[in-house]
Image: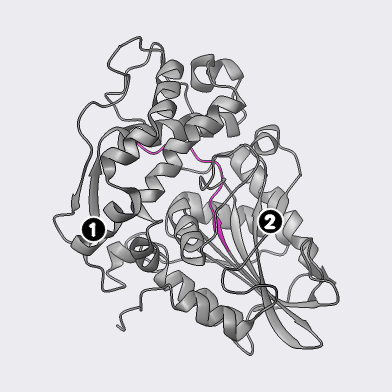
Amino acid sequence: MLAIAPSPVAAKGSTIERVVLLMRHGVRAPIDDEAPADTRVDDRWPGWPVAAEHLTPHGAAAIRQIGRHDRRWLTTTGCPAPGDVRIWTNTAERTIATGRAYAEGLAPGCALPVGHLTAAQVDPLFEPLRAGATAFDAGQAVAAITAYTGGVNALTARHAGAIRDLDRVLGCGSPTGCSTPGPATLKPSANGRGIEFTGPIRATSGTAQVILLQYAEGMPIRDVGFGRADAATIRRIGALHAALFDVFTRSPYMAAHQAGPIGAHMLATLGASDGPKLEALIGHDTNVTALGAALGVDLDAPGFARNDVAPGGALVFTRRRDARGSFVTLSYRVQPLDVIRSGGAVVVDRPLPIPGCAKRCSVERFDLLLRAKLAPVIAR
């Protein structure tokens, strides 16, 4: 038997009817060339215990901690009944492994199923542009991103200090900088289903994320950013990774298309008369930042730059009921960076305001507000 119980952000006098969340995968090894191959450093990059892009054992342990935290929403006698919990992930190993670790923490010993498409398929929930799930126009996207950022050169200029901080960490000693040289450019991709972005932000964003992942993995501090990256530095250079989302997910046009399919799916689950009591969708930082932008909220967590999504971080929709009926609350649930590093159990669940709802947001009002920000999904 499974019943939804009050959560850490429960509204007074209400009960929880359903929880729907979108979560980034846990700590992984770097993606090939995430730190571009021509990045100049004064030492060798440390090795990782797993293949490129895979969830690490340390990352899996952190996700299990999150699952145990989320279990507080559930009161059980034995394992959840079939259909009460639904876990769906993207096709990458790191998302599937995250789903399995989350299931283990949420319902230990219960072998909860973790659903996903095959590796040969493109899931439109998590990769809508690649799947052609919306009527995306790359030319409109470039114009919208330019309007939102002020242009890619202005974006670069705003983050010049963080680029200098990263150069000090890399320690190459070059007066021209340590990362890939070249101008900032933004244009439609050749196939029209995306955009191509080059330049300093593109080159440095992945390197900054690799250094954050080293810290989150619990590597000896001498191996984190070549021994020159403490927690404060990692937060500062994390702004470079967050800046990547200013291009790919946070302008209104990009948010509408990047979050369109998954946002519509979450609204359908949230508003259904029946269905899972808890649905966990596990994807990537692009998914979480796009949904956050569509909702009109910023994502802040201890140790992370604003809008740089934490491994395991999730946007949580909670449908509650009180004497006046059903309503929705929103929160951002994360582990602080130092907690991920140490393997601790602390989880922070921060309530977020819902723009357009001053206090109480009915299910119908929430659906109307978010759906208006999402690009329609093309019927197949």
Q: Position of residue 199 (x, y in %)?
A: 25, 35
Mark 1 vs mark 2: in front: 1
Residue located beneath label 2 in the image: 104
Rendered view: 141 above or below 303: below
Q: Secondary structure at mark 2?
A: helix
Q: Amino acid at mark 2?
A: Glu
Q: As drawn, is 291 to the left or to the right of 221?
A: left
Which of the image's four quarters has the N terminus? bottom right
Q: Is residue 53 visible?
A: no
Q: Position of residue 61 (x, y in %)?
A: 66, 43
- Which SS type dominates the magenta stretch? loop
Rendered view: 333 above or below 360: above
> CA gap, disc 1 to disc 2?
44 Å
Residue for point 30% across, 73% down = 134
Q: How many marks?
A: 2
The answer to which of 146 and 85 lies nearer the viewer is 146
Q: Quadrant of residue 183?
A: top left
Report the span colored magenta.
22-33
The answer to which of 313 and 174 lies nearer the viewer is 174
Q: Residue furthest left?
A: 190
Residue located beneath label 1 in the image: 143
Residue for point 45% across, 43% down = 242
- Other-residue count near label 1 (Cα within 10 Å), few / some / many at <14 / 14–19 / ≥20: some
Q: Position of residue 57 (x, y in %)?
A: 60, 39
Q: Secondary structure at mark 1?
A: helix
Q: Position of residue 106 (x, y in %)?
A: 71, 60
Q: Quadrant of residue 274?
A: bottom right
Residue for point 54% across, 29% down = 234
